[in-house]
Structure formats: structure tokens, C-alpha cells
Image (spheres, rainbow, N blue to C red):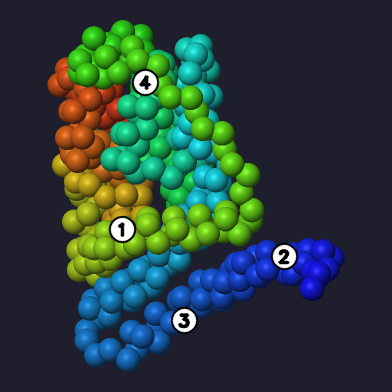
Amino acid sequence: MSIDPAKDNESSRQSAMIPIIGVFVAALCWILLYTHLESLADLAVDLLPGHSRARESMHFFVYEVPKVILLLTAIVFVMGIIHTFISPERTREILAERPAGTGNALAAVLGMVTPFCSCSAVPLFIGFLQAGVPLGVTFSFLIAAPMVDGVALFLLLGMFGWRIAVTYILLGFLIAFVSGLVIERLKMEHALEEWVRELQKTPSPAAALQQDHSWRDRIREGLDSVRSIVGKVWVFIVLGVGAGSIIHGYVPREFMAGIMGEEAWWSVPAAVLLGVPMYTNIAGILPVAEALIGKGAAIGTVMAFMMSVIALSAPEMIILRKVLKPRLIAVFATIVASGIVIVGFVFNLLL
């Protein structure tokens, strides 16, 4: 019995449309739920007994947890699809043999559109070095990837509005760009660990050609990214929102304004020093930042704290120690921390 090619093609087209229709329906459900979060939080809190501070704290928690998770899920899904168009091999090809300045800017931009946290960006950092990408250019990528990615932009838009989101992204890009340039000018390739320098002498394997993906494959990749990333960070989100809810409900406004307000000039460098030992991602730290700002903390101080947590975390430094000698780690941390402090002061002056 012969198979009609026309019917077979029609069946294939219908099958290909199913995931797209599923995404469309999921998007409608996402919009419906996101636009009613405030009402759902009000309803949940009304059902709970307790005094005003406890209810205020609980409202913050019940509203912010699904809000951040919904935003993160949507952005990670989209970034997962984008990732099917930009492979790590292709990224290394683009960055290799670029002139100073151009390579740093390009690396920072690529860091912004690739979904890597500070620790997961380190393996790519090693791959870039092996592919012949200049040291300063690799650092521009390493700084930008966790701090100013697409997730950060859309979460900041959803929580603080476009002015803070755009200012954060532009200044974060500037930190990555300038820090990479400074490190490149210092000529510190000798501060790489010996095994990394040996690795640079060996040719990297030819980049695998990016296979053509169907939209079914791209959507599956987006869903896999959601399962992988959101599945790992939701605990950080709950903990971050929990800390933010305590600050929001119980910490007096005057107390936070006195410690992290614009009048306390030392608050910006102190916030950077406080943030370095911590480790979370943008989704986990944003609810804390929102609560701090709501209690009177200066925007620049809070943004400096947030940037230091994301870009200069202790776990990242521990992983980098396998690649870099202590002197280069110290130089990297000092340059980036100085840039973050300057950005904090600029934020406080502009906003």
C-alpha cells in the first residue's frame, strides 16, 4: 500500500505545529497568572491571621516568589531557544583574533546574551583561552555573562522599571568592557596556571558545525533550559524572597536608610565587601534588593551589593583558582570591585 506524499507532508506540518500551539497556550496562561498575582496575594494574606507586620511580610513573600519564578521561567525559555542559534564553538570563533577594544565590547555583548552564571561561565573561559582569545577579552565575557544577561534585564524591568534596568545594563556592560581592557593592558598571561598555558599551545578541536534545528527541537531546548536552570535556582529564589520579606516587614525604614542610604558615603564600598562572600544569581538577589530599596536604602548602594554578589562570588573565586594564580585573581577582583563601587556612586548621583 503506497503512502500519499501530500498527506504525509500535511501530517508532518500538523505535528510540527503542536509544540508551537502549546507555547502559545502556555504564554496566554503565563500572562493571565502574572497579571493577577497581586489579587492572588491579597486573597492568600486575607485568609491568614496575624498582625500587620507579619501580614505585610507574608504578602511580599506570596507575591514575589511566583512573580520572580514566572519571569525567570519565561526569560530562560526564550534564552534557551536563542542558545540553539549561538553555540559555544561559534562564540569562541567570533572572539578569537579580535583587536583590543572591539573584542572586549563583543565579548561583553556575547556575555549578555548567553545564559551562564558566574561558575558555569568558567569552563567557557578556559575554552576561550585555548582557542586563542586574548586574556582581557575572556575576562570581559566572564564578568558580563552572570551580571548583565537577558534574564537580569527583564527581571529588572519587571521589578524596578526601565530607567533602573537600562542604567544597570549599561553600567554593567561598562564594567565588563573597561575591566577587560585594563587586564589586557597589564599583560598578565604569565599569571595563568601552567596547565592552562600548555593548553593554549595545543590546537583546539575544530568547531562542530551547528546543526539545523526544527522549531520542535528549539522549543525542547528551551524547556530543557527551564528544567535545568529554574530547577537549580528556585531554592535561591525562595531563600532570597524570604530574606526580602523579613526586611520588608520587620526592618525599620530608618534603620536601613541610616546604614545604606545616600548620606552614608561608606555604604557603597561596605556593600561590595559584604556581597563578595555570598553566592546567588540575579533571580535570587533581586527580591532582597527590592526589599532594601523599599526600606529606604539608596539604589546605588543596593545595586553595588547586588553586582558584587553576582560577579565576585566566593565560589567563582575558588573555581578560578584552578585556572589563575592568586595574583591575577586579586587583580581581577580589585578591578571589578573598584568598577562596582564607582557604579554604585553613579547610581546614587543619577537616580
Q: CA distance from mark 2 to mark 1?
A: 35 Å
Work out whether mark 4 precedes mark 1 in sequence or the reverse, and give the earlier one.
4
Work out whether mark 2 precedes mark 1 in sequence or the reverse, and give the earlier one.
2
| Pointers 1 and 3 in contact (C-beta within 8 Å) | no
Q: In the picture shown, does residue 262 fall above or below 244? A: above
Mark 2: few, some, or many residues within 10 Å (few <14, many ≥20)? few
- The residue labelled by disc 2 is 12
Residue at 57% x, 55% y is 217
Residue at 40% x, 70% y is 66
**Is 57 positioned to the left or the right of 221 in the image?**
left
State which quadrant residue 251 falls in. Answer: bottom left
Q: CA distance from mark 4 to mark 1?
A: 29 Å
Q: Can you say which quadrant of the picture contains the N terminus? A: bottom right
**Image disc number at residue 253:** none
**Is 45 positioned to the left or the right of 334 in the image?**
right
Q: Amino acid at mark 1?
A: Lys
**Image disc number at residue 130:** 4
Closer to the camera in the image, 52 or 184: 184
Q: CA distance from mark 4 to mark 3?
A: 53 Å
| Pointers 4 and 1 in contact (C-beta within 8 Å) | no
- The residue labelled by disc 3 is 39
Q: CA distance from mark 2 to mark 4?
A: 43 Å
Q: In the picture shown, does residue 281 fall above or below 55? A: above
Q: In the picture shown, does residue 49 fall above or below 82? A: below
Residue at 74% x, 64% y is 13
**Image disc number at residue 232:** 1
Please tell me whether mark 4 sits on a helix, a strand or a loop.
Answer: helix
Work out whether mark 1 precedes mark 3 in sequence or the reverse, and give the earlier one.
3
